[in-house]
Amino acid sequence: MKQKTLSIEKNVRIIIPLYILFVLIQSGCSDLTPENNEIPESFQYTIPTGGNSWVIHEGIGPQEAISDSGIIKWSDPGKIIRTYFRTSEATDLEIAIRVKTSQTASELKTSFNDNPKDVRISNTDFDTLMIGKFKTENPGYQYVEFENPQGGPDQALDITHILLNGIGANQKVHYVSEDFYWGRRGPSVHLNYQKPENTGDVLWFYNEVTVTEPYDVIGSFYMANGFSHGYFGMQVNGPDERRILFSVWSPYETDDPGEIPEESRVKLLRKGENVYAGKFGNEGSGGQSYLKYNWKAGNTYRFLLKGEPVDQGTIYTAWFYAPANDTWKLIASFRRPKTSTYLKRLHSFLENFRTETGYLTRKGFYSNQWVRDKEGSWHELTRAKFTADATARKGERLDYTGGAENDKFYLKNCGFFDENLEIGSMLERKPTGNPPDVDFPALQH
């Protein structure tokens, strides 16, 4: 997926000697304000709240206080905000914040590792205020929690950064420093399936997906059947809407589907009943289809994809099997022009496409993968390479992992858990030895 770049300018210089700043802050003086909203140099780590904070809700909720600039004009006394970062070792931290109030002095309630500390904010220009010293009992993800108990427009708070001292020379702190949109979505993780050596050209790709509670989080895409030119899987789009999604990219590279020349457009050949079909953009462009289907956590769903070269391109067709229906349902069939290939680069992935749920964990099980070559032979896929996106590869978020449990692979991401799997790891599940029973002639009707 393409990642759009967001950036924050930081002009950094020492305003006053560190020891004077600390003495004045701890004595309650807040007259010393960084000029032009500058950030003092005296801290080892400066963590932008804009890319690392969430308003914590029961499930999904609005994030109106969070922007790329940080926690801005926060006046809701009923909300709690957490800012996350990860330490590589247990350590003693000094924590400060860069903060201001709108008009009237505010009492900011903070806590770290369940240790509360109240801070009085009286400065109406940005200042750096110490919260205190705290001990991290274990390495891994930590968070600073904020609450504005008084709230109201006169006591709205802006908190742009958390500042840390106490990090050892060989330690590292992980946090989102750029590309806030992608960082708040969280890391995406993939299974890249390894075909057995004796596999011919792949005509069919079969996979099964199971998601259990509470991992069916809004904004999740459990992509089952990925290939070189598209993807097919199931999503949680809202509290009352879930989808089965199948998309094929155009050979013309653009994020605007309106720019695609006629000869490079993906053509819809047919679609199933109640299936929407149209165009998509923003992350490449092409043909998209989806069925609104209220799939249930705990059930196992089956996905079948066909890719076949023809005279005018390659035809990709997707079918979905739900236990409640006891039949294969056509999603859509698209022809991709300027292409002549069978199915290649078979993979699955798990991603979050809603920034406001990037602090919640999702997990999906992927099982019983098979391919059928053009000669009609089934081959089981029991090995997969684990990979991840740029947010993970940069080390800005490490809340991602994957693995194999008996005859199932799994992927897990977001939620600031501490377990982590090295990118590039090879995974292997137990084989089932039972290829899927598919009535292929019936699929054509």
Image (cartoon, rainbow, N blue to C red):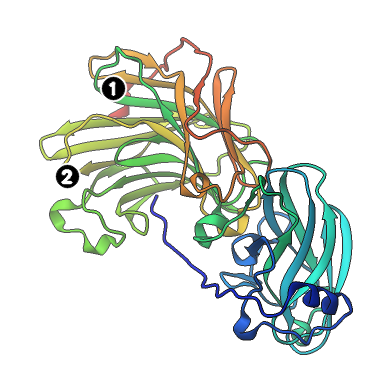
Q: Residue furthest left?
A: 311
Q: Is residue 187 left or right of residue 196?
A: right
Viewer-closest of 114 and 329: 114
Instruction: Label 1, secondary structure: give it.
Output: helix
Q: Is residue 355 above or below residue 362?
A: below
State the CA–CA distance, disc 2 to disc 1: 25 Å
Residue that appears at 84% across and 56% down: 134
Three-letter code, disc 1: Pro
Quadrant housing residue 385: top left
Q: Is residue 107 visible in this depiction of the protein?
A: no
Quadrant position of the C terminus in the picture: top left
Instruction: Label 2, secondary structure: give it.
Output: loop
Three-letter code, disc 2: Pro
Q: Is residue 36 visible in this depiction of the protein?
A: yes
- Say which mark, if any, is on residue 337: 2
Image x and y of residue 301, in percent: 51, 31
Image x and y of residue 171, in percent: 67, 46
- Say which mark, if any, is on residue 329: none
Other-residue count near label 2 (Cα within 10 Å), few / some / many at <14 / 14–19 / ≥20: many
Q: Is residue 301 above or below residue 119?
A: above
Which of disc 1 and disc 2 is earlier in sequence?
2
Q: Is residue 307 above or below residue 149?
A: above
Residue that appears at 21% across and 59% down: 260
Q: Is residue 55 left or right of residue 324?
A: right
Quadrant housing residue 361: top right
Residue that appears at 27% across and 58% down: 254
- Say which mark, if any, is on residue 441: 1
